[in-house]
Image (cartoon, rainbow, N blue to C red):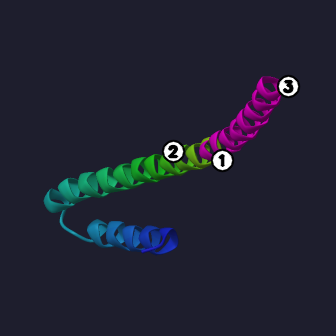
Amino acid sequence: MDEDTFQKKLAELVREIGNLPKEDRSKLEALARQTKQRHAKLKETVSSLQESLDYLRLSVKYLLFDLEATRRENGYLRKMLEEQSEG
């Protein structure tokens, strides 16, 4: 269910709750508010998780770049050592 559908269904539910007798209405209105708050919290959590994953992906790319550079430097230095030991 996408965000628009959820918001429409929740608004529809709140309207239907408004048609109930007062004694039943207050408990269900509280549950609807809690649902809306939990949904907002879940959206924030998913957004934060997505940002963390993006940062992790970027960090891995930098680490792979650094690893490749280190391997090239290591090969270059080994070659230099071999040339010095031969000469």
Judged left or right of residue 23, residue 16 is right
* Quadrant holding the N terminus: bottom left
- Residue placed farthest to the right in the image? 87
Q: Around disc 1, counting alpha carbons within 10 Å, would you say few (fewer than 14), some (14 to 19), or many (20 or more)?
A: few
Name the residue located 47 percent from the left edge and 72 percent from the top edge. Answer: 2
Read off the residue under disc 3. 87
Distance of mark 3 from mark 2, alpha carbons?
58 Å
Between 23 and 40, the one nearer to me in the picture: 40
Vertical comparison of 55 with 36: above or below? above
The circle drawn on residue 48 is 2
| SS of the residue under disc 1 | helix
Read off the residue under disc 1. 61
Image coordinates for residue 49, horizontal then vertical, percent: 48, 47
Name the residue located 30 percent from the left edge and 50 percent from the top edge. Answer: 34
Distance of mark 1 from mark 2, alpha carbons?
20 Å
Name the residue located 73 percent from the left edge and 38 percent from the top edge. Answer: 75
Say which amino acid is labelled 3.
Answer: Gly
The label nearer to you, 1 versus 3, is 3
Vertical comparison of 58 with 39: above or below? above
